[in-house]
Image (tube, rainbow, N blue to C red):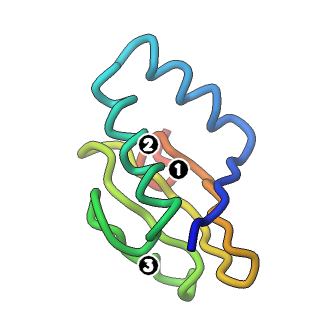
Amino acid sequence: MMYTIRVSDGVDKVIAKWKKSNPNLFKKNKKIYKELLEHPKTGLGHPEALRGGGDITWSRHITAHDRIIYDIYEEVVEVYILEVEGHYNDK
């Protein structure tokens, strides 16, 4: 089963910034995106369900400082990426 990935406002801008300024971070994020398409609950970055998010909101480490935070909607087979930069709103 392949999931569809959607992103919240601002995520595309961060990814574009990483593509120019930090190619290694961009590549790692790209690998995680590929995994999210097939299995959003396992793989790179130590996926974990966030407390208070039930089994919907998950996170993965991109770096020691940056996390990808996303919701998984099984009923529509979709992953919605909420944030990719920072650690839980510590900007």
Front-lying residue, 75 or 13: 75
CA separation, marks 1 and 2? 6 Å
Q: Which residue is mark 2?
A: 86
Q: Amino acid at mark 3?
A: Ala
- For this orientation, the residue located farthest to the top is 20
User: Residue 49 has which mark?
Assistant: 3
The answer to whether the residue labelled 2 contacts the one labelled 3, judged by CB atoms less than 8 Å apart, is no
* Residues packed near mark 2 inside 10 Å, few (<14), some (14 to 19) or many (20 plus): some
User: Residue 89 has which mark?
Assistant: 1
Residue for point 56% across, 21% down:
16
The answer to whether the residue labelled 1 contacts the one labelled 3, judged by CB atoms less than 8 Å apart, is no
Q: Amino acid at mark 2?
A: Gly
Q: Amino acid at mark 1?
A: Asn
Find residue 39 and report its horizontal and vertical position in percent.
Answer: 44, 70
Indicate the secondary structure of the residue bearing disc 2.
loop
Front-lying residue, 17 or 2: 2
